[in-house]
Image (tube, rainbow, N blue to C red):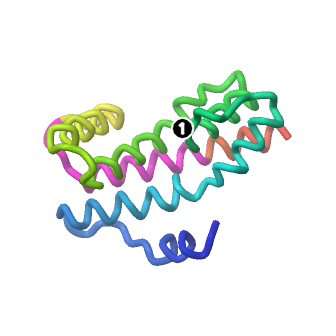
């Protein structure tokens, strides 16, 4: 983890208020910590060493493919889901798309987190953090039992 990401992680605080500014900050910080901190070049090298192409894959897809090859009996897409949801949350708040696109993405996030009804960012935050923790615990157990 580079120094900037480490600083973001150490200074990160959970959302206190449910404002657009706070939502954008939390989504961006969590994405930097959990998604952008992966070394895409290293993931590509690992895939190459496994005889796989990585040219058209982004970082999360590279990691998903490595885990799928390493643990073929595991539902890797379920383990990776919180990372993809987190990425989509950041995209929703990055102002890169239309309001309609943002609303569709937020609805998709709610559905994938099994949170129905009015959008409650604090609930989304808590659910993503819990699912990330669960995924990491499962990955930890997989690596411990398969090495």
Magenta stretch: dominant secondary structure: helix
Q: Quadrant of the C terminus?
A: top right
Point out the residue furthest to the top here: 73
Q: Position of residue 113 (x, y in %)?
A: 35, 37
Q: Quadrant of the N terminus?
A: bottom right
**With respect to residue 76, does 18 lie above or below?**
below
Q: Quadrant of residue 118?
A: top left
Left or right, 41 with reference to 111: right
Q: Where is residue 144 in the image (x, y as percent from the top left)?
A: 78, 44
Q: How many labels does the image show?
A: 1
Left or right, 12 with reference to 7: left
Point out the residue furthest to the front here: 55
Point out the residue furthest to the right here: 147
Q: Position of residue 105 (x, y in %)?
A: 27, 38
Magenta segment: does it hold 120? yes
Name the residue: 38% across, 60% down.
28
Residue, disc 1? 80
Secondary structure under the numbered disc 1 in the rendered image: helix
Write the start and end of the magenta stretch as one range. 117-136
**Mark 1 surroundings: few (<14), some (14-19) or many (≥20) residues within 10 A:** some
Name the residue: 50% across, 70% down.
9
Magenta segment: does it hold 23? no
Q: Where is residue 39 in the image (x, y as percent from the top left)?
A: 65, 54
Nearer the observer, 146 or 89: 89
**With respect to residue 15, does 124 lie above or below?**
above
Nearer the observer, 30 or 140: 30
Q: In which quarter of the image is residue 109?
A: top left
Left or right, 145 with reference to 91: right
Q: Quadrant of residue 143?
A: top right
Name the residue: 61% across, 35% down.
64
Name the residue: 15% across, 44% down.
99
């Amino acid at each position: 983890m580079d120094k900037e990401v480490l600083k973001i992680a150490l200074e990160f605080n959970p959302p206190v208020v449910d404002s657009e500014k706070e939502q954008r900050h939390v989504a961006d910080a969590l994405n930097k910590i959990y998604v952008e901190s992966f070394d895409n070049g290293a993931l590509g090298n690992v895939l190459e060493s496994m005889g796989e192409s990585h040219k058209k894959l982004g970082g999360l897809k590279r990691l998903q493919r490595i885990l799928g090859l390493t643990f073929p009996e595991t539902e890797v897409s379920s383990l990776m889901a919180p990372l993809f949801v987190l990425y989509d949350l950041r995209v929703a708040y990055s102002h890169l798309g239309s309001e309609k696109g943002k609303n569709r993405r937020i609805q998709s996030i709610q559905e994938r987190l099994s949170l129905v009804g009015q959008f409650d960012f604090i609930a989304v935050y808590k659910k993503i953090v819990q699912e990330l923790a669960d995924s990491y615990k499962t990955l930890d157990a997989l690596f411990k039992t398969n090495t």
